[in-house]
Image (cartoon, grey):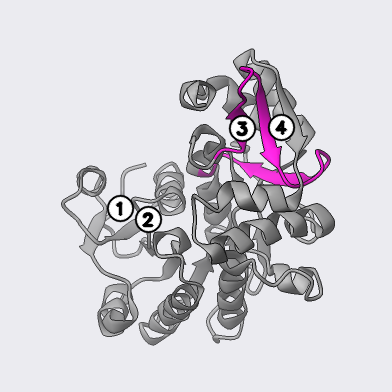
């Protein structure tokens, strides 16, 4: 579609437009048959990605979404009918900051008179596990914001994103490793039957957000869970088929896993990763809840199809 300039078209304000999820939301709205006006926020509107969006008719606004800038955030949200909100924990690794900024954006949207809020949250591992796993701060911080949003007095929906399929392509984040003997394994601290909700977040996350925005009745207070449920065994098999390389799941003791990642990240993130894995193994990524359905002709890309089209060269070459 062509971005509408008609004031009757809903104005959607989107945070994080040069990131994975915000960018996916933008593309899904651009592909919609319905007209939208889109206001996109980025810290640097002169970046190449931002300039390309300007060329497509989007309103690009330079905005730093931090606590000290709360008044400017309210101004930036003013006039919007709908806002999509997301935070980037891995930019700063500070759960308190993420929670505070998430709440601030919700308050700003309410103060600006926004009619509907869509938020990218995650499950609460501490709650799912009845207090057994309490170090999953990048999950639980977002879950705190979700609860705050549901009580804010503005129609609010939490669209949770599953495990990024693209993370498996990044040598710094992929569990797939080349071993000394030249073979490949997914090195994880959990059983190969552990289930992950895998999603092509770049291409598909925005479809779920668009479905919420275009619902005949906005599903206030609801939680949408995205992805395709697959065991680690199934993931390894599908990537093996796509790459022509035999990839197995290799479970290692939790302490060995902790030591292996300790050189790559600070101690509290090591604890976070370990708790997320163990909580997922024992209680399920979404606490055993089903994946949300997606209506319409355009269905999410399966991992099998994603893997067949992806470039695995960096992961398969790493050692």
Mark 3 nearby-residue class (10 Å; few <14, some 14–19, many ≥20) = many
How many labels, in total? 4
Dot placed on the residue nearer the N-terminal end, 2 or 3: 2
> Which residue is outermost to the left?
46
Q: What distance separates the C-alpha of mark 2 from that of mark 3?
A: 40 Å
Q: Quadrant of the N terminus?
A: top left
Q: Taking the image as drawn, is residue 259 in sight?
A: yes
Residue 175 magenta: yes
Q: Which residue is mark 4?
A: 235
Q: Taking the image as drawn, is residue 311 in sight?
A: no
Mark 2 nearby-residue class (10 Å; few <14, some 14–19, many ≥20) = many
Q: Is residue 66 found left or right of 185 in the rendered image? A: left
Picture coordinates of residue 90, whole percent (x, y): 45, 59
Q: Magenta segment, which residues?
A: 174-201
Picture coordinates of residue 238, whole percent (x, y): 70, 24
- Is there CB contact under 8 Å for labels 2 and 4? no
Q: Which residue is mark 2?
A: 36
Q: Which residue is mark 3?
A: 176
- Is there CB contact under 8 Å for labels 1 and 2? yes
Give residue 2's quadrant in the image. top left
Q: Nearer the viewer, mark 2 or mark 4?
A: 4
Dot placed on the residue nearer the N-terminal end, 1 or 2: 1
The secondary element bearing badge 4 is classed as: helix
Foreground: 120 or 192?
192
Q: Nearer the viewer, mark 4 or mark 1?
A: 4
């Amino acid at each position: 579609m062509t971005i509408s300039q008609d004031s009757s078209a809903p104005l959607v304000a989107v945070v994080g437009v040069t990131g994975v999820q915000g960018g996916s939301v933008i593309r899904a709205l651009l592909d919609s048959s319905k007209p939208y006006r889109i206001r996109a926020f980025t810290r640097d509107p002169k970046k190449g990605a931002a300039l390309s969006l300007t060329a497509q008719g989007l309103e690009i606004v330079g905005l730093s979404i931090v606590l000290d800038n709360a008044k400017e955030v309210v101004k930036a949200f003013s006039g919007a009918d709908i806002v999509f909100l997301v935070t980037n924990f891995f930019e700063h690794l500070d759960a308190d900051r993420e929670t505070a900024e998430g709440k601030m954006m919700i308050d700003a949207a309410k103060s600006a008179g926004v009619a509907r809020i869509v938020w990218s949250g995650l499950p609460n591992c501490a709650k799912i596990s009845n207090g057994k796993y309490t170090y999953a701060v990048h999950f639980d911080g977002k879950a705190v914001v979700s609860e705050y949003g549901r009580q804010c007095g503005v129609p609010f929906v939490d669209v949770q994103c599953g495990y990024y399929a693209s993370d498996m392509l990044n040598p710094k984040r992929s569990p797939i490793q080349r071993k000394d003997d030249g073979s490949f394994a997914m090195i994880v601290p959990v059983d190969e039957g552990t289930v992950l909700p895998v999603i092509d977040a770049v291409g598909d996350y925005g479809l779920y957000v668009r479905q919420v925005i275009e619902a005949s009745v906005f599903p206030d207070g609801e939680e949408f869970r995205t992805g395709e449920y697959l065991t680690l065994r199934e993931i390894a098999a599908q990537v093996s088929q796509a790459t022509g390389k035999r990839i197995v799941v290799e479970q290692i003791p939790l302490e060995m896993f902790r030591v292996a990642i300790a050189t790559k990240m600070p101690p509290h993130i090591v604890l976070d990763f370990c708790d997320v894995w163990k909580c997922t193994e024992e209680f399920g990524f979404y606490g055993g809840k089903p994946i949300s359905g997606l209506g319409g002709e355009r269905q999410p890309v399966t991992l099998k199809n994603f893997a067949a089209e992806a470039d695995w060269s960096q992961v398969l070459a790493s050692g």
